[in-house]
Amino acid sequence: MRAAVWHGAEAPVTIEDVTLDAPGPNEVRVKIAAAGVCHSDLHIIRQDWGGIAAPMVLGHEGSGTVTEVGRDVTDLSPGDHVVLSWIAPCNACNACHDGRPTQCLTHANTVSAGGVLHDGTSRLHRQNGGTLFHYSGVSSFAEDVVVPASGAIKVRDDAPLEIIALVGCAVATGVGSVLNVAQVRPGSTVLIVGCGGVGLNVAQGARIAGAKTIVAIDVVKEKTQRALELGATHALVAPMDGDHQSQAGLMSQIRRLLPNGADYAFDAIGGKQTAEQCLNALAVGGAAVMVGIPKSGLTAEFEPQKLVDLDQRIIGANYGGIVPAVDIPRLVDLYMDGTLLLDPLVSHRRPLDEAADALNDLQAGTALRQLLIP
């Protein structure tokens, strides 16, 4: 089959013919309908997180049809429509038993750290026999994947497979961070810093939660306008430069719209400045929610006394705190009943051959969510 392969430091992403093994026990093979291009794929090729196994088949957001099931798989069959979850819980570790599958220890210690599947091996190989690694147990920038059965979430057959690929990462992360992690209350005020795929879905989540005022910020005006379509009540364009004066001006605009501060402020970027903006914009009793994943080692500053005096909180939100088997079908249902909007998130549909170009466009900030169609 064909797949988009990242070869390591400063190497280009190329489309190659690769070999995909049959699924092992508790695994399934899925024919990919569409794969979303996410900023996390950029983190990989920029080596922002370090220690990533290469060469690797990229992609962690996708949907498709089950074509083959391995031994011991009982809840999936060929022909089932699935959305892929980039955390496939092992259902055996302490975190899984505690109802926190996004903190699955097998995923963290084996899949994420090693670029392999649950048993510590890869199903992907170069045609000359060399091993290729999996990205987060998915590797959806390909014609087919083999994934743990717990990471292939069965959804209703009448949902359009291409568009629901987005539910696997951007939608689940953004909406889940609002509904599951922050548990935004009706009538509250929300600030969103960053209107990429995740930030736009934070806006949707805030709308669904019944927030009264939702302020979205981005450096690209077109992205803030899209946030207004999806649920934001106000949009601000942030200055490209980060000097003190321009940031003070932005904070003044935020205060005009949210005179008492934000009950919830979401950093959908993952940066020092954006995290500090969220903290500085909080209302009394407010919560700053860190959603975007920063570069390893990045730090931000805050005043602990201020948090204590004002009863404020800092919350981390990994993958929207979802339970994949429960939340992914629920999000697909919300799309089908018109509550959740997915189509406005997509800026481009392009063939798998254009994977490298799609990543370049994402890096340049000229694209929202792009779908690669094998």
Image (spheres, rainbow, N blue to C red):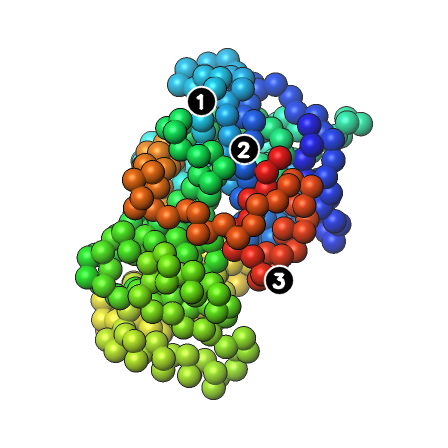
Q: Quadrant of residue 5?
A: top right
Kindly identify which numbered label has been placed on residue 364.
Answer: 3
Q: Can the viewer see residue 41 in this picture?
A: yes
Q: Is residue 52 left or right of residue 99?
A: right
> Which of the two discs, 1 and 2, labels the residue nearer the N terminus?
2
The picture places residue 354, in percent across and down from the top left corner, at 67, 45
Q: Amino acid at mark 3?
A: Ala
Residue furthest toward the bottom? 245
Local secondary structure at mark 2 = strand
Identify the element where label 3 is drawn.
helix
- State the SS at label 1: loop
Q: In the rendered image, which residue does mark 2 sit on?
A: 33
Q: Is residue 84 above or below residue 338?
A: above
Q: Residue 80: which disc?
A: 1
Whether residue 49 is visible here, answered yes or no, is no
Mark 2 nearby-residue class (10 Å; few <14, some 14–19, many ≥20): many
| Quadrant housing the C terminus | top right
Q: Amino acid at mark 2?
A: Ala
* Residue at horizontal 39 percent and vertical 53 percent from the top: 201
